[in-house]
Image: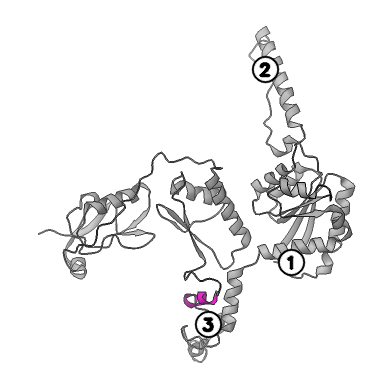
Amino acid sequence: MRPHLKILVIEDAVDLLEQITSSIGNTIAYFDRRDLDISLLEANSVSKALQFVREDGDIQAVVFSWDVVAKVKELTDVVPLNGVLNENTSPTAENVRSQNANEKTTSEESSAHNAVIDNNAKVIDAIKRIRPELPVYVLGDAVKGLDIVNQANGIESFFYRNDIISDPESFLGYIINDFDDRNETPFWTEYKDYVVESNDSWHTPGHSGGASFRNSPYISDFYRFFGRNVFVSDFAYMFSHFESDNIGHDPLKILIDVSALDYSNQEIHRFLMDEVGLEIEKFTHSTILVLLTLGGMRSKIVRLYNALKRLDDGAVNLSKRKSKSPLPADIPPIHLDDLPSKAFFSPREAIPWQNSVGRTAAGLITPYPPGIPLIVPGQKVEQAHIDYLQALASQKLTVQGVYDGEIYVVAEG
């Protein structure tokens, strides 16, 4: 199965639509892309185009003719109006007046829905609301070129319509290059380069490309099954291969501070998962952790950025939290009542964590993330610890070492 670049062309002039799609379609064979399927899809109205964008996930680019006439009703969901009287209601004078008023309202609303929109940038906005990562290439004339670019924020690029007809190969080449860039897998590419360059990997199992596996009469089939690359591609060391990354951490992990937002972490998590389809790895009281994969594409980053921008702009239908439980500014220093090893192996009992002030912990209490213990075995539990755990509990965060509301402490007596 090969990637599919389906290009949606929007033009309401039928002859011009056919001319544009024929010009572009005739140049597809020139590129000799045996690794890519390229096809064109025509839409002679905005409503049909939006339906295609909503239902056809293979569409990877939109070519939009700026001179298309779009009506308000094509950009909005029209709710049918019910002007029928109830069967059990007699047509009294009051009912007649009410019906006449409804008919007048219906007529006014119908007129408004049939009105032509004043700025075709709204069409682009409608496309982006459905598929924010979808690039939109606008076709127009030379006179309106700069005005169009200034009006429409969501366009990928602008082209003169006559240039598309006279030189469609350059235009299609531009779209294909953009498609390749958006679907590039930079981490996978770097990973492959790393593997190819790792000729003598002493830090990996089997040393020197798995020689001990390859030469073993017992498990050589393991080597034949997985191949050499699995032995020279140790993820623990490969990220030094990213020369441009001087941060010193895993570039596949993105930690995002959401503490300034008015929504709870649960609401943010639900929005990103249900509305945008983005899975969050972990979240704390103030951050969310997003994991990319080797197959992650730029379009996925665009979707994440757009979702976060909507959250930041308040352009989401989420309940705002009434109050925010701040975490204590300071955590008390560690005061050990006993050696951690002795406390851990001592007789223990489970008590509600709210009642553990003054007791000696017999296990680790670790909020995760970040995975740093708040309390260690042998440590005296203080009220500040309880306040901290209470703040975490109110935000439904994971705390390892708490079992059904209880923690282990050293048994008294």
Residue 120, quarter of picture = top right
Q: Residue visible at 21% across and 70% down?
A: 341
Could you say which is closer to the camera, residue 48 or residue 82?
48
Question: In x, y percent, where is residue 277?
Answer: 56, 53
Could you say which is closer to the camera, residue 309 or residue 275?
309
Q: Which residue is mark 3?
A: 232
Whole-angstrom CA distance, mark 3 to mark 2, is 77 Å
Say which element carries label 3: helix
The amino acid pointed to by label 2 is Leu
Say which element carries label 1: loop
Q: Nearer the viewer, mark 3 or mark 2?
A: 3
Q: Residues within 10 Å of mark 1 (few under 14, many from 20)?
A: some
Q: Among all residues in the image, which is located at the extreme left?
A: 413
The amino acid pointed to by label 1 is Leu
Point out which mark residue 36 bears. Answer: 1
Question: In x, y percent, where is residue 289?
Answer: 47, 59
Q: How is the image coloured?
A: one colour
Compared across the picture, whether 304 is left or right of 391 comes to right
Could you say which is closer to the camera, residue 38 or residue 124?
124
Could you say which is closer to the camera, residue 79 or residue 69?
69
Q: Earlier in the sequence, mark 1 or mark 3?
A: 1
Q: Earlier in the sequence, mark 1 or mark 2?
A: 1
Residue 22 shows in this picture? no
Residue 331, quarter of picture = bottom left
Compared across the picture, whether 259 is left or right of 273 comes to left
Question: In x, y percent, where is residue 127?
Answer: 69, 47
The segment highlighted magenta reads: 231-241
Q: Which residue is mark 2?
A: 85
Q: Residue visible at 53% across and 40% down?
A: 317
Whole-angstrom CA distance, mark 1 to mark 2, is 58 Å
- Magenta region includes residue 232: yes
